[in-house]
Image (cartoon, rainbow, N blue to C red):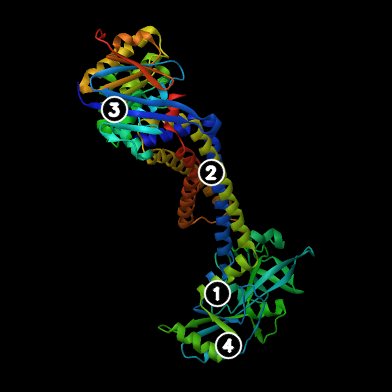
Amino acid sequence: MPLVFTIAFRNLFYDRLRFIATVIGIVFSIVLVTVQMGLYLGFGRTVTTMIDHASADLWVVPRGTKCFEDPSLLDARERYRALAINEVAEAIPVVIGFADWRMSSGETTPVFIVGSDLRSGGLQPWNLVEGQVEALSAPRAVAIDRSYFDRLGVSGIGSTAEIRQQPVTVAAVTSGIRSFTTTPFVFMDVNRARAHTGIPSSKTTYFLIRLSPNSDSNLVRRQLMSNIPNVEVLTPAEFRERSRTFWLFSTGAGAALFAGALLGVIVGTVIVAQTLYSSTKEHLNEFATLRAIGSSRRYIYNVIVCQALLSALIGFSIAALIGAAIVQLTAATALPIIITPELLAGLFLLTVVMCVGSAIAAIVQVTRIDPAIVFTR
Amino acid sequence: MTDALIKAVNVAKVLGSGAAEVAALRGVSLELNGGELTLLMGPSGSGKTTLLSILGCMLTPTAGTVHVCGHSTAAAGPEDLALLRREHVGFVFQSFHLFPTLSATDNVRLALDVRGEPSRSAKVRSREALAKVGLPHKALAFPRELSGGEQQRVAIARAIVGNPSIILADEPTAALDGENGQAIMKILAGIAQEKGRAVLIVTHDPRLLPFADRVVHIEDGRIVREERRGDKQQ
């Protein structure tokens, strides 16, 4: 084993209390950054869940639409202009909107209605655990997620309630379709969605466009934009990005998450820098001895950086385990924390950079060391 | 007698500045030759340690010249001086300065590791050096498990393991009892005989005189007397 590593390892473990403080600092910092960034990813994914699960090649949206939940409307008759383009196989209307759900007990709670032409399979509920999508074609039929049973005052298929004074019956139940706004999604046929949200039958929120095989989507997109006034035509990726950007940055949610992560990095850096500095100070005699016996400065820097890297490795490993536990704990919540392999790699890199950066103060101290002090100590 | 391994000519050193300025050395000239054990003796504050630091390339003189194995220290920067120390000088300190977290072997190996010697051969050479100072059985012991005399032997092994031409020792027996001090001096005297090494020992202790080939007396930053001894103890 190289001596540089041995010295670094032993220096690190020599004062166990300080070592524990260092590791706690790194773990605290990295867990905080993990949670913030995991929330960022989770939030980013949750806000696009409807777009992710819609079966569309293109989205026709009202001009200026900021996100999926935007309440602007299109003229439903524009569907025929879309269908007039040869390569457009289907133009499926989607209606969304907020409404009040009245439970049999008389209490009300807001819900978010998602209505689509169920025969075309535009934006249907997924992860069904009870009932069938076809059941939603029945009068008054809706699909809800089982995680909202208590909230909506229902117990499963057959339960009834009212939306805008109109009766609804639970005909299908999903699992894991959670809304980041905590407002439950209610899936239904597009025409009933209009009735329940008060949107006139001449209006729709979006058209999901499906193209014929081997169509040039860019060409169709240009044709759609020239055929239909006051709309934008977006690919799913563009709509996803637009929704994400709106919720994460226009609302300040993303900035708050990043600020939290930055705070974590600062706290971690300060703690690691302080402990490395005090460790170096305590071992100054040894570093002076190394210098006296002819070591280069680089050799000593290597010892300090190695200490920092060891701290990073140990701290990151513990933080990663805690992060994995948090991911498990939040998996079924409305806002799950998501850790991707890329995030994990980024966090490891951040830990290394943070710890090595923290070694600068210690390195500066060692740079000033006078080897002749070994004669006087 | 060989060519001088260290040659200091008219060396002066001023320490501090302003009102705190002190002339620690005032025109010291000294040569250290291979095969000789030289004692540098003088009262406290006479400039012994400053001279040792300059000869050991830890300090540069304010005036005068120093050549170590033919290399001038005049224009040398900190890294050049470190290189000179690494290649030509071994140090033995009064308070040993062993790494408490390293075994005896690893403490010795440090002197080779800083030179970039591969681990395997460095370990072999370190064990040989420990055997040379009579501690082959303590190779895995940590400093806290060793007596003062044993710790100083480890420090000597560390000083000689890289085969430097010059060994500089600062009060190497001051922290030891008489018996251990004599044992350490015997080792150092033996080292001075090997391969024409020069050994310079700074000391107050007159009991070391029998081991010296030469004794240099320093007072107030000047060499005041130098004597050669013919009745050296082996």
Q: Quadrant of the N terminus of chain B?
A: top left
- The image quarter in which residue A341 lies: bottom left
Location of residue B139 with respect to A75 vertically, above or below: above
User: What residue is at 52 percent from the left and 49 percent from the top?
Assistant: A324
The span from disc 4 to disc 2 (Cα, nearest Å) is 56 Å
| Residue at the far right in the pictured view | A106
Residue A243 seen: yes
* Tag 1: amino acid: Phe
Q: Are marks 2 and 1 in contact (CB under 8 Å)?
A: no
Q: Chain of mark 2?
A: A
Q: Are marks 3 and 1 in contact (CB under 8 Å)?
A: no
Question: Is A18 rendered above or below residue B38?
Answer: below
User: CA gap, disc 3 to disc 4?
Assistant: 97 Å
Q: Quadrant of residue B229?
A: top left
Residue at numbered disc 1: A239
Q: Secondary structure at mark 3?
A: strand
Q: Earlier in the sequence, mark 4 or mark 2?
A: 2
According to the picture, the residue beneath numbered tag 4 turns out to be A79
Query: Where, quadrant-wise, is the C terminus of chain B in this rendering?
Result: top left
Crowding at dot 3, Cα within 10 Å, few <14 / some 14-19 / many 20+, comes out as many
Q: CA distance from mark 2 to mark 1?
A: 38 Å
Residue A236, given in percent of the width and then of the height, sits at 52, 74
Tags 3 and 1 both on a single chain: no
| Front residue (pair B172, A358) | B172
Single out the mark in the foreground, 3 or 4. Answer: 3
Tell which subunit mark 1 falls on.
A
Quadrant housing residue A301: top left
Q: Where's residue A131, x and y in %?
A: 58, 67
Mark 3 or mark 1, whichever is nearer to me:
3
Number of the label disc, if any, that sits on residue B6: 3
Q: Which residue carries the number 2 mark?
A: A26
Q: What chain is tagged by disc 3?
A: B
